[in-house]
Amino acid sequence: MEMIIDFPGGARVDAHFGPYTVKTDQPPMGGGEGSAPTPFAVFLASIGTCAGIYVLGFCRQRGLPTEGMRIIQRVRSNPLTGLVDEVELEIQVPPTFPQKYYDALVRSAEQCAVKKHLERPPRFNVYTAVVSQPA
């Protein structure tokens, strides 16, 4: 997959891929306007939404309603490094949700592709390339 990252102004940085654009910005105290989430917030949101796709799929396959369900994501950072130490996903279900599916629901969320990539991170290759500008 290829994404084009551009700089539309201010502290905004956008990612374009296929027909989509993911917009990011920095908060005012970081030099931005706060018009969009920060790139790191988008990254964190991808964890919970990815788990959510698997939970949704699990429920749909079994004809289980998702009304009243939600996932609460909590992120704990190391105070010394500022890096994330732990991500907790709490799958909240209504009282009517069949208890026999609780463990399987957790297993479905654990199949999240974002989570799996964090467990086995890719290599990063960052470099500069000079391109000529059209006349």
Image (tube, grey):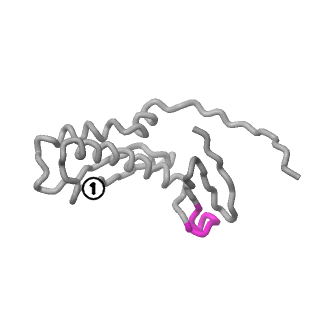
Choose between 117 and 82: the one closer to the eye. Answer: 117
Residue in front for this viewpoint, 83 or 41: 41
Q: Give the prevailing secondary structure in the magenta stretch.
A: loop
Of residues 103 and 60, the one nearer the viewer is 60
Query: Residue 120 at x, y = what percent?
Result: 46, 30
Callout 1 secondary element: strand
Classify residue 55 as left or right of residue 30. Answer: left
Q: Amino acid at mark 1?
A: Arg
Quadrant position of residue 72: bottom left
Quadrant assignment, res 117? top left
Does the magenta-highlighted stretch encompass residue 78? Answer: no
List x then y, in percent, for residue 128: 76, 39
- The residue located at (56%, 68%) in the rendering is 35
At x 49%, y 53%, the residue is 42
Q: Which quadrant of the view contains residue 24?
A: bottom right
Number of numbered tags placed on the structure image: 1
Q: Residue 93: percent from the left, percent from the top?
A: 19, 53
Quarter of the picture holding the N terminus: top right
Write down the residue under mark 1: 70
The reply, left or right, for residue 42 in relation to residue 48 is right
Q: Look at the picture and state if 59 lies above or below 27.
A: above
- Few, some or many residues within 10 Å of mark 1 (<14, 14–19, 20+): some
Q: In the figure, 62 relative to 6: above or below?
A: above
Q: Position of residue 116 (x, y in %)?
A: 41, 34
Q: In the figure, is residue 108 to the left or right of 86?
A: left
The magenta segment: 25-35
Identify which residue, 35 or 76, lies in the foreground: 35
